Image (cartoon, coloured by chain):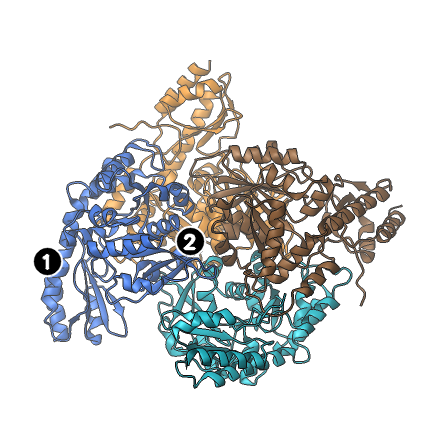
Chain colours: A blue, B orange, C cyan, D brown
Amino acid sequence: MKNKRGFASDNNSGVHPDIFSAMAAVNEGHTIGYGDDVYTASAMKKMKEIFGEESDIYFVFIGTAANVLGLAAVTQSYNSVITAKTSHIHEDECGAPEKFTGCKLHALKTPDGKLSPEIVKQELYGFGFEHHSQPGVISITQATEMGTVYTVDEIRALSDLARNNNMYLHMDGARIANAAASLGLSFEKFTRDAGVDVLSFGGTKNGMMYGEAVIFFNKKLSENFKYIRKQGMQLASKMRFISAQFEEYLSNDLWLKNALHSNKMATLLAGKIKDISGVQITQKVEANGVFAIIPRKIIPILQKEYFFYVWNEDRSEVRWMCSFDTSEEEVNDFAVLLKKLAG
Amino acid sequence: MKNKRGFASDNNSGVHPDIFSAMAAVNEGHTIGYGDDVYTASAMKKMKEIFGEESDIYFVFIGTAANVLGLAAVTQSYNSVITAKTSHIHEDECGAPEKFTGCKLHALKTPDGKLSPEIVKQELYGFGFEHHSQPGVISITQATEMGTVYTVDEIRALSDLARNNNMYLHMDGARIANAAASLGLSFEKFTRDAGVDVLSFGGTKNGMMYGEAVIFFNKKLSENFKYIRKQGMQLASKMRFISAQFEEYLSNDLWLKNALHSNKMATLLAGKIKDISGVQITQKVEANGVFAIIPRKIIPILQKEYFFYVWNEDRSEVRWMCSFDTSEEEVNDFAVLLKKLAG
Amino acid sequence: MKNKRGFASDNNSGVHPDIFSAMAAVNEGHTIGYGDDVYTASAMKKMKEIFGEESDIYFVFIGTAANVLGLAAVTQSYNSVITAKTSHIHEDECGAPEKFTGCKLHALKTPDGKLSPEIVKQELYGFGFEHHSQPGVISITQATEMGTVYTVDEIRALSDLARNNNMYLHMDGARIANAAASLGLSFEKFTRDAGVDVLSFGGTKNGMMYGEAVIFFNKKLSENFKYIRKQGMQLASKMRFISAQFEEYLSNDLWLKNALHSNKMATLLAGKIKDISGVQITQKVEANGVFAIIPRKIIPILQKEYFFYVWNEDRSEVRWMCSFDTSEEEVNDFAVLLKKLAG
Amino acid sequence: MKNKRGFASDNNSGVHPDIFSAMAAVNEGHTIGYGDDVYTASAMKKMKEIFGEESDIYFVFIGTAANVLGLAAVTQSYNSVITAKTSHIHEDECGAPEKFTGCKLHALKTPDGKLSPEIVKQELYGFGFEHHSQPGVISITQATEMGTVYTVDEIRALSDLARNNNMYLHMDGARIANAAASLGLSFEKFTRDAGVDVLSFGGTKNGMMYGEAVIFFNKKLSENFKYIRKQGMQLASKMRFISAQFEEYLSNDLWLKNALHSNKMATLLAGKIKDISGVQITQKVEANGVFAIIPRKIIPILQKEYFFYVWNEDRSEVRWMCSFDTSEEEVNDFAVLLKKLAG
């Protein structure tokens, strides 16, 4: 069977061959379970070279869990979390944050998936008032669910706002590699150095099989996180197979090559379709996603050839995601077909 | 680096080569995420050939999650779950069942890790009394955490008791393959046919990398389980890599070969040490674990060569687990060393 | 000490003398605790005369609990609750709904505290999509937190919308007496008969001391509610003192007299101030509250004489609530002072 | 209607007349809600005279809530609470502690409802081990549910054990007045001074209508408790009516008079029946309850005259509770009837 590649999601891709090989390489003999093994120690070492010795890092299975458990570590149930209406934690986690943390989410409308201090301030009130959920965290996604990317200054403005209100800044980095590639910056520059307190560091959308890291930049925040992870049902027994993935992912710039490629494919796609009549690109293409309004009637026809998701039914807006393994040829073919159908 | 094999846990082993190859085989092209792919469909088909068309099956990442989410599906927060004091859900999940379901656990003492109707009945009271957590589930482990195995009749006695009290029977099958191999029965005979309502079907301790199945034998119980799984942070995006493991695991009797072997190694070990002076085997060896009281002073010396866990500090009781890849030679060498040290 | 009456909240008032006497009247001898007593039976009978034999009624301590436990009865944790941004369950319960039910709240902006089908429909999507919290309940407040009142038709439009989407309609009736008095309708006409599924029936803001009722109009929804109430920490031991209050409250039209009076006082107040220069009434006065923008600088001076709350700091909007015991003289004096200060 | 007094529970009694009068006395005019009123300030002052300026005190509605919220304040969800099998938090709160705190309860068998260091130590293991719920609190009841009373030394032994393991000591004081009367000590002597960290201070079983206090002896533990109380649905709007009760209860030794009386009645009852053939008193009578095994067949006959509860069906063991308003004559009549029936 030959699986065709489409533009549905960057998690529809498989696993990068180098990562697969790295997993195979650790598959021999016995190692202690749950992370007390040499492969995990080595992966941690590599991550700390990036994020600093003061960082505290925990592997979990998936991004939803990384987000929810990271939030749980820095909240009490009477806190609220301020986030964008389009954020994964609000739209796509089936209420996992509320269920697990007990916190209220304030999901605010944004033009482009990005919070700003001005937007956040709508919910910055009621501090100390016992009837009101206490604002505890600002949560942003980098790159956003809309394919846009926060600048360092934008992040710092939010972390300053958080700190001034005794709140924390959480970053959902499911596509953090795409953001780093887009910004041309190493990870720590727009996370730790920009005032992020807790980070979900993802790789599954960029060539890994499974596994995500929760990274704390202040060990005070994570001193009991191992219990939160275990109670949160996210402690892997055969941890070495997550660790081997991260080790490889962060070696030889694999993460960067993959992300640069998928970003480039999205830019290529946008370039090829932007002038097609009836097609309107709706968001800046800063990472690996393209959002566009296209003629409603061609959507099902196009989907038959290349699966993808309708983002906004009312507006006939669709989302196309590029992956580390998307080829130029596929982008070309897709653009040609779109032009033919829309024309 | 060469990892030595020990007797610490069956999850200290790696992944069976056939399973690894099966994972590699599905690693090409794009497939829709979250389980809507041909590999998952195929694995489900194979599982339903075993458990019946009426079964409803969901993959999750790990056993703790399979247990907790399975329990969540059949309880409301005012229910209680009756289990053995030694059960994984009570001892080794850091309170995940209580946190996620809100239920109370009644953890009862047993001689051998097995509940019986007589033991369970201690907590069968207060039905309809609003002050009292309502007994809702009996949860058993097969094979137990003590290396023992329930017979079909023993399971049926508990499922009858459950049904007569409008309760459900849950089975933690983290080592269900070892139990099946021990009983010489196919899975459905001592699960579905014996009245089990919801089953955690594990493979990680028997040669898989990660992934566990929650199996319902009555679709009424699982009609909303997809939301519970997602909210429970256990929905894998690249599901095909779990599905491929299960497909292979259940093909060509791989599960059975692995389990028969690890059981055999445990029996071999028990046979070789049972007459050593100062060594007292404390539980029947019916699956892949051996429990024994050994001289306290030799424990650290023995652990230096082969890592394993002390089960009961006070009694100087240790646990040795055999894996699908444990060799006869290792068992021999270990027994010889033990004899030398204990003698 | 003489406590001055103000316009801060209808719960700043004391207890109506008739209700206090009724409590005294049941204070003799022993009765079985937790509601199995003659006074509770009698109060239930009276409530069922209003709400119908098919209704199922439970007393709790306070409105927050009535709301939260009522919502818990008709949701699973993967559901969402759609409510107005100004609702008590969103703004003033410190996240109790999220914490206790695990559900997500969608808090939508409204001009006047009232949801409409059009507003609700913004969140009616993602049904059956496992990543998305499943819309389960529409929750409205009657009278609203903004002093407005839903008509029967408006409620019916929302209950139709709910039913068509397999959702429930919840009503927070903390000020339901004011709404009934305003509409000139008995309670059942705009609750049960208009399609409300579960109702928080309050009395504390209208002359009771404590105690609220959760009323279900379909016993299927409440068959396990007694456990939810107990686990929700809301089962009173000396229940007779809540029951006696409800009995009296619903006798001799006491609830109606009180509500008509407080509504009348609010109307009187609005009439007296509406033409004062610098004062702008911002909401229709349909119940017992008046919302107005007044000159910012006079607020602290006015508050020194009569305590009340600023509703919206930015807009210099304040809220004045009238109670069952507010006197015409007080309204007059207050209006005179306001005019003097604003002039 | 004349309500007969029985021996079912000390919460079947009504409200002491002095307390009722005190409630009436504060029922005039308006006061700010939720506790920011002079009556609450005064009650707090009185309580701090007893428990010390360093104590931090919060009123809630009922004992279950006092227990659960107090525990919530000193735990994270990965903690466990060690308590007696007979404790109210384990047996009679329908799982509220698990639901609200997420914690595991370890309910241990005791001969007399009292924990001892030896009993508690059974569960003192697994510290720092992430798979294991971390022991966080020892919870005791004073007087116990079995009518027994901890000595100061016994409490101190438990608080020392707690502190040595970085745990907290919680006391459920639903019948703390009976314990104080029994010990001949003022409250602080066997709470604060004996190392209790958080106390549920009850009055409802000793003449109050409703209302319980959560008392912290270290303000570090309660710095966010106001949010926990609100989110826990236990913040009363018309707080003055709880405060007035506590004020009166703690004035003129009312609490002590009531408790001495009910204790005395229990002792009287025990004395009168201890030699009846077929009647066997099973617990020391140290507070206001008497536990006895009586002939099974006379229970329903006796219950027809005086309602009470069977404590242990299997053993034919019953519980008789005396109240502040139990009369000597009632005790006599009851003993006479028992003797007649048992003889």
- State the residue in front, C95 or B256: C95
Looking at the rendering, which quadrant does residue D61 occupy? bottom right
* Secondary-structure class at tag 2: helix
Residue C74 is situated, as x and y percent measured from the top left of the image, at 50, 66
Q: Is residue C90 above or below residue B333?
A: below
* Secondary-structure class at tag 1: helix
Which amino acid is tagged 1? Glu
Is residue D311 at least partly visible in the picture? yes
Callout 2 environment at 10 Å: few (<14), some (14 to 19), or many (20+)? many
User: Looking at the figure, which quarter contains the N terminus of chain A?
Assistant: bottom left
Which mark is nearer the camera, 1 or 2?
A: 2
Looking at the rendering, which quadrant does residue A315 occupy? bottom left
- The circle drawn on residue A101 is 2
Q: Is residue A231 above or below residue D40?
A: above
Residue assigned mark 1: A328
Which amino acid is tagged 2? Thr
Looking at the rendering, which quadrant does residue B254 occupy? top left
Q: Chain of mark 1?
A: A
Callout 1 environment at 10 Å: few (<14), some (14 to 19), or many (20+)? some
- State the residue in front, D231 or D243: D243
Among the two numbered marks 1 and 2 on one chain, the one whose residue lies closer to the N terminus: 2
